[in-house]
Every structure is written in structure tokens, then in C-alpha cells.
Amino acid sequence: MDNILNKLGLNLDEKARLTDESSFRFGCHKGVPCYNTCCKDLDIFLTPYDVLRMKNRLGLTSAEFVSKYTEPVMHSESKLPFLKLKLEEEGTCGFVSDEGCSIYEDRPLACRYYPIGFGIYKNDKAAGSDFYFLIKEAHCKGFEEEQEWTVAEWRKSQGIDVYDDKNKVWMDIILNKKMLSPDLEPDEKSLKMFFTGSYEIDSFKRFVFESRFLEVFDVDEEEQELLKNDEVELMNFAHKWLQYALFRMPTMKLREK
Ligand code: SF4
Ligand code: SF4
């Protein structure tokens, strides 16, 4: 389930590439003989929106969630720090239960996509367009089920469109880093900024409202209220700040001196 990272580029046989209209047979429910067996021995990379949904589901601060349920991993392609879900000692995901996923409504994006992976074209002709592929693993009996899906129907049924929309700017940041300066090792300050802006929404909120942030950046009263009260807006704002801080993109307005 490391398909989140595959978005950042992968070499795949053309024939294996799927589009939104491509169809496949698949079903996953309590009756399949392999039920629950796939929630172990896997790398589940987390997006910022995953962290936000899961920490709220569990009633934790972002720092508590990060420390209890995740482990850091350096993404070799972008040289940026990512988080993956920490597994139990025996290699099982801590959220799996006899009834399936105990946080199903807030499960991470990687779990939603499975058994689909996705990538992005890197050639000039089709730069920026996404494609998909099936992850066919021998242990997964879901492909023997009768139900047919198009990729678009699968994405909709799993709430993937919503997650992709919330993570879009963040994904662009990683892709930008990978395309523009793949070999550049970010300095400690940039790594810290990326980590806070990506995964530590509570620290980022304190940074905005309890530091000199609002003396430097021009954020009107209405937006400030929104950022105080809506975590998804705050997350989007954090990603815009990362675009400014890491790439000097014109996504933030500076106060006039
Ligand atoms: S979060 Fe849920 S769906 Fe994902 S691996 Fe864990 S138990 Fe399975
Ligand atoms: S292995 Fe496949 S069919 Fe079985 S529980 Fe996992 S996703 Fe569902």
C-alpha cells in the first residue's frame, strides 16, 4: 500500500496503465477468505489530511498522534520527511479488528486506494496527468469476486476524490521538489518547516497565532477567524505557506513595511 509515493513517478508497462474509465472486478467484504489478512506487513504512508482525520477520530493532538501512531521515513525521491503508520510488533496495523478496520470512515488514503495504485506521467507530452494500475497480490482473493468497477467508480465509492482534493497542494509540493531539485538535501530548517506544515497542525496554529507570523504576513481578519476555527482551512493555509517558504512561490502576501 505504498501507492501514495508512486504518484511521484514510476516506470510501468504502458499496457498496465489504467484510466478513469478502465474497469476491473473486485470485492472486499467479510465473506472473502482473506478478510483482514492484508492489514499487516505493509508501508502505509500518511498524507496531511490522513493525519488530520485520524487524530480527530482518536481525540488526539497532532503531536500525540504522530508520536503514538507513526514513524518517520525519509522519502528517497524527494529527500523530504514522510510519516508512515507504525505497525504492532507482529507487523499488524493497530487499527484492524475482527470486524475489519476500526477507523474505517477515517482510514488513510493508501487504504482507500487499494487495490489501485496511481502514478503521474513525467514525459513532456503528458506531464502532470495521472494514471492508475492494479496491485494484484497473490493473497488477495478480492479479484475473484463478481462486482465490476471502473476506476472512477472505485475512487468515488472510497471517498478518494475528497482526499486527493485536500492533499493536492501538498502533493504538488513534493512533486515540485522532486522535479526541480531531486538531489538537493534540504537543510534542517526546511525539513522542520516541511514536517510542521505537513503533519503538526497544532504546532502550526501556534506558529501562526503566537509568533510574529502575522506581523510578517498579511492575513485579513476574516481569514484569521477561518484559520482559528477550521482545521482543513488551516491545513490548506499551511501548504500555501510551505510553497512560499520552500520555493518562494507567490502564495503568501507580505505586510508592507
Ligand atoms: S488503517 Fe484500517 S484499512 Fe488501513 S491497514 Fe489499518 S486496519 Fe487496515
Ligand atoms: S486481501 Fe484483498 S480481498 Fe482480502 S481483505 Fe485484503 S483487500 Fe480485501
Image: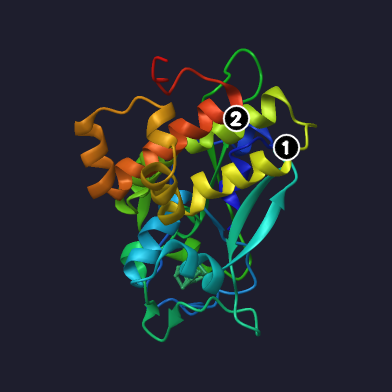
Reading the image, the residue beneath label 2 is 246
Instruction: Indicate the position of residue 8 as horizontal and vertical percent values.
Output: 63, 37
| Colour scheme employed for the rendering of this structure | rainbow
Q: Position of residue 61 (x, y in %)?
A: 40, 66
Going from N to C along the chain, the mark reached first, 2 or 1, is 1
Label annotation for residue 186: 1
Residue depicted at x 47% and y 70%: 64
CA distance for labels 2 and 1? 9 Å
Contact flag, marks 2 and 1 (Cβ < 8 Å): yes
Q: What amino acid type is highlighted by mark number 2?
A: Leu
Residue 20 position (above or below residue 146): above
How many residues crowd around disc 1 within 10 Å: few (fewer than 14), some, or many (20 or more)? Answer: some
Question: Considering the numbered disc 2 on the image, is that residue within a helix, a strand or a loop?
Answer: helix
Q: Residue at x 58, y 39 (%)?
A: 7
Label 1 sits on what residue type?
A: Pro
Camera-side residue: 124 or 239? 239
**Tag 1, which secondary structure?**
loop
The structure residue drawn at horizontal position 49% and vertical position 64%, both measured from the top left corner, is: 63
